[in-house]
Amino acid sequence: MRPVPARRPGRVAAAAICVVLGVGLIGGAAAGTWLDDDSEGPAAPSNYTAARDLWHSVPVDTLFPRTIRGTGAGPGGADRQWTRIGVAPDGDCAGALDALLLKVITPVGCVRMLRATYTDATASSVTTVGLVFTRADPAAMTALANRFTTEKLGDRTDLLPRPYAVKGTEAAAFGDKQRASWTVRVLTDAPVLVTAVSGFADGRAVATPQAAEQATANGASGLAAEAGLGHDAKGIADNVERGLRKRVAAGPEHTP
């Protein structure tokens, strides 16, 4: 049998150094991962929380565009276009919502409400869209959204948003008695409610308002459905809601 050659001290030292370096690199990588996880956790800003301040940090033209185009948003899939004719001063919800609706949203609170009124391309309809910014956390908003669904609160004619009449425009006579169709949405990914209410621009009174979800259903009948006022309320609310969600998703670092 051949004798086993003796190990050279240099090679042994080199091997030991490699082991030490390898362990150090692995440990360092792990430590770096832990540090990164910690730094991206609680320190990261919450888009949900930041959304509560959008009412005063985002330009009005971003929340309520001057012109809204609704591709396929009209009756029979027709295209619609609405033009903004007035923006209400920001304020609380007391004068902007029916008293019972105000009571229903009490659990989430009302920090601020913004509203704008639009007219369609023919100037025959007017619609007021609103954003209610609340102080609620996600759990409270989810609870309110579930209540609207299970109790069908969105169909009740005593839980309506109120219109914003704009003097000297097609919406000058747009009052509570002129409300024909409406929608109220409770968001769960932002502390916000989206509302919209529509009516005729000629100021005619409507005895029985019809919820937008009902007025836009296939085969729907009734004054609001046949005049397309449900499509106005729904189409404008859809557009404003999408814009808000986009702004919330962008995060506070993109807020002007």
Image: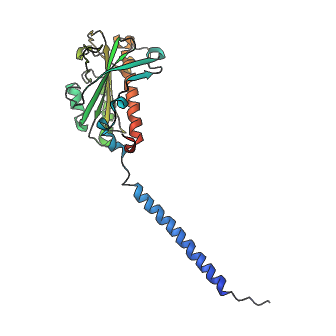
- Residue at 27% from the left image edge and 37% from the top image edge: 134
Of residues 199 and 216, the one drawn nearer to the viewer in this rendering: 199
Across and down, in percent, residue 58 comes to 34, 36
Q: Quadrant of the N terminus?
A: bottom right
Across and down, in percent, residue 226 comes to 39, 11
Q: Is residue 13 above or below residue 81?
A: below
- Residue at 54% from the left image edge and 69% from the top image edge: 25
Across and down, in percent, residue 76 comes to 47, 14
Q: Quadrant of the C terminus?
A: top left
Report whether 17 appears left or right of 200: right
Q: Report the colour scheme.
A: rainbow
The answer to whether residue 248 shows anywhere in this view is: yes
Of residues 216 and 40, the one drawn nearer to the viewer in this rendering: 40
Determine the residue located farthest toward the right in the rendered image: 1
- Residue at 28% from the left image edge and 30% from the top image edge: 114
Across and down, in percent, residue 61 comes to 36, 29
Of residues 204 and 185, the one drawn nearer to the viewer in this rendering: 204
Of residues 186 and 42, the one drawn nearer to the viewer in this rendering: 42
Report whether 232 appears left or right of 4: left
Occupied quadrant, residue 22: bottom right
The answer to whether residue 181 shows anywhere in this view is: no
Occupied quadrant, residue 6: bottom right
Determine the residue located farthest toward the front in the rendered image: 256
- Residue at 38% from the left image edge and 26% from the top image edge: 65
Occupied quadrant, residue 39: bottom left
Report whether 209 appears left or right of 246: left
